Amino acid sequence: MNALLDAFWRSVAYCLHPKVIGLSLLPLLLVIGLIAGLGYLYMDPALAAVQGLLESSDLLNQLWAWLESIGAGKLKTVLVPLIVIALATPLIVVASLLVVATLMTPLIVRLVTQRRFLALERTGGASYLQSVLWGVGASLVALVLLVISLPLWFVPPLVLVLPPLVWGWLTYRVLAFDALADHATKEERHTLMQRHRWWLLGMGVFTGYLGAAPSLVWSIGFVAVALAPVLVPLSIWLYTLIFAFSSLWFTHYCLAALQQLRLERAAAPAPEPLPNAGLLELT
């Protein structure tokens, strides 16, 4: 627990570092560019598809007719873009995490290493390509889990548990791997991720709940649609900062755990030779 809290407060302090703040701008620009490009190509078809789906339901048509009778007919035109934004949010979150893990985490690991773990040997256990493939694979699994669990989100208690658990698992798998990629061997990485699995998952779930915070900018309701050009970049920037903090937290914790593991192994007594070893060598 002490190592967890120590890494947490160090990460909070590092978030105020000018270099970290500057590094968060590059993923922000890339994700905004990606979302803007996809929105330009697919926003109109997505809006038309959602509107057609809503109009195909007799029950919803009765609801729209009743809303029009009480002067709230414009609700339908506002609800459609809100649904599209809600469906696009998981993709935005995954894109933000992957961009941060791919671009920021190696630089964050380098920064933390130079300031705290300069003597820690780099074994180069995983290549940059392996890190990217690991992150993409974990993201695909997380998206499948989100789609499978989507019907359960309509159960009030589960909607507060399932998404953060999925985001937490994804964050833990991606950022813990990337934090150890340069310094740990494959065996060390496997050992640490097994030994500290529950602490790492807890860190991931905590940051998963933090990751839900940017979605609150849409809770202002229908005004959010009019403010979407401002709220979308704001929410993406918040996602970027949260994942940057998460990357720092996992880096501090994982590198400290790796340092402790190597100290334990260095202090362990060497195995004694077998009594007949010398005899066998002579024969």
Image (cartoon, grey):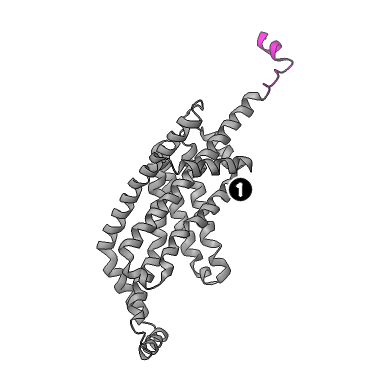
**Where residue 204 appears, x then y in whole percent?**
53, 50
Tell me the quadrant of the picture where the N terminus can be found.
top right
The chief SS type of the magenta part is loop
Residue 94 showing in the rendered view: no
The magenta stretch is 269-283
The answer to whether residue 50 is above or below residue 130 is below
The answer to whether residue 50 is above or below residue 177 is below
Task: State the residue at coordinates (55%, 53%).
Answer: 206
**Where residue 107 appears, x then y in whole percent?**
40, 37
Q: Is residue 21 left or right of residue 180?
A: left
Mark 1 sits on what residue? 198
Task: State the residue at coordinates (51%, 61%).
Answer: 163
**Which kind of residue does numbered mark 1 sit on?**
Trp
Tell me the quadrant of the picture where the C terminus can be found.
top right
Label 1: how many residues lie within 10 Å, few (<14), some (14-19) or many (20+)?
A: few
The secondary element bearing badge 1 is classed as helix
**Where residue 51 appears, x then y in whole percent?**
33, 76
Residue 84 showing in the rendered view: yes
The answer to whether residue 49 is above or below residue 259 is below
Q: Residue furthest bottom?
A: 69
Q: Residue furthest left?
A: 40
* 165 drawn magenta: no
* Nearer to me, 210 or 273: 210
